[in-house]
Amino acid sequence: MIRFNQPGLVGPEIDYLAKAVSDGHTSSSGPFSDRASAILCEALGVPDVALTTSCTDALELTAMLLDLGPDDTVIVPSFTFTSTALAFARQGARIRFADIEPRTLGIDPNHVAELIDDSVRAVVVVHYAGVPCDLDGIQAVLARHPNIEVIEDNAHGLFATHRGQPLGTFGRFATLSFHETKNFICGEGGALIVNDEADISRVHTLIDKGTNRREFLLGNVDKYSWRDTGSSFGLSDLLAAYLVAQLEGAEEILRKRAAVTDRYMRALTPFSERLGLQLPHVPEHGTSAHHMLYVLLPTNEARNAVLRTMKARGVQATFHYVPLHSSEAGRRFSDSHHACPVTDDVSGRLLRLPYYNDLTPSDQDYVVEVFIDAASTAV
């Protein structure tokens, strides 16, 4: 079986884990957490990055930081993971689902413009597959609504760019994922990118269970106490140690993933017209983080048939998101129903091929062989 995903090591992960244990700080806010945050701040050019236990937690933090409530609406793409919406629903906000546009599979700015009213407090954009969504279009729409915040769910796109600027630096906040299926991993983990220095103090208060512990550690107060709402969002320094090794090896990881993408694209492109395949599109003004390789087949029936055949021949391909607007919870937490036809269409035709750092060329060649055989029969 060629697995869909296989977490890998790039260097001193195990050594760093041992050092975290031997140095005696394994809880959150330790030296490895500081190192990981510093690496990300420097690479992205942002004032602060706060490590969290997951990307979901980072999204929940944004909802808390915006003080969202039942009178507020957040626009979210329907084609995304549940966390993108549930983080805001959990805070009591109403969800309004937007469709995606068919090239990048990111949120459609034209649909966002139709959905905006006086209750909308934020628009969440997702950079699907590590490819920039139409940020120019979103910025043009929101230029007429300066009170609406942009939140970037950048779980897929760390180190990708739009017009030379890193993804995750376009909104007031952005979130990252270090789940084992992502480009840079620590098992389970995430981060909140803070793009406005004015938010830094409250971010750390919420992460430190509503206390001003950070101010105490900085020597600004002689004791810390309960000041705000919050939770235990901080990432263990054990996981941060693993993450530091991954981030230090970022260049090697991105090189390997770019090679996987390139080999798939060169192998699949000659068959795309004959088989009616749509391959990933990277905008001319953007760069990809090489998070995944997906293929859109002509029909839902063809996609499902190909998945069955690939499984039978030992290749673990998979589909992706079920549209949130048609889910049970999506209908419950949405404030209204809006058709998302592109989302419905893409969700039914999309297939993800095995993709990870150390996927060998010979395994890739077998994946492509099985896929082309299966697609040729199915279509």
Image (tube, helix red, strand yellow):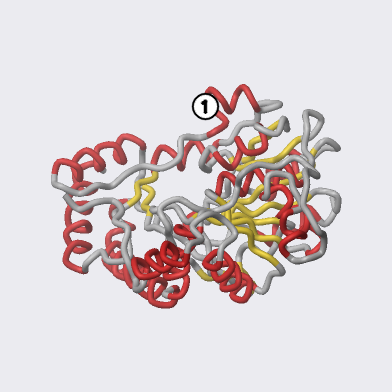
Amino acid on which the number 1 mark rests in the picture: Ser
Q: Is residue 297 above or below residue 160?
A: above
Q: Is residue 8 visible?
A: yes
Q: Nearer the viewer, residue 51 or 95?
A: 51
At x 40%, y 53%, the residue is 187
Count how many numbered circles sit on residues in the image.
1
Q: Quadrant of the C terminus?
A: top left
Q: Which residue is mark 1?
A: 327
Residue 64 horizontal side relative to residue 248, left or right:
right
Residue 23 horizontal side relative to residue 208, left or right:
left
Category of crowding for the residue at label 1, using alpha-carbon neighbours closer than 10 angstroms: few (below 14), some (14–19), many (at least 20): few
At x 66%, y 47%, the residue is 124
Q: Quadrant of residue 173?
A: bottom right
At x 61%, y 44%, the residue is 232
Q: Nearer the viewer, residue 137 or 288?
A: 288
At x 56%, y 73%, the residue is 39
Q: Quadrant of residue 256?
A: bottom left
Q: Position of residue 68 (x, y in %)?
A: 77, 38
Residue 328 horizontal side relative to residue 135, left or right:
left
Q: Position of residue 245 (x, y in %)?
A: 42, 70
Q: Secondary structure at mark 1?
A: loop
Q: Nearer the viewer, residue 18 or 151?
A: 18
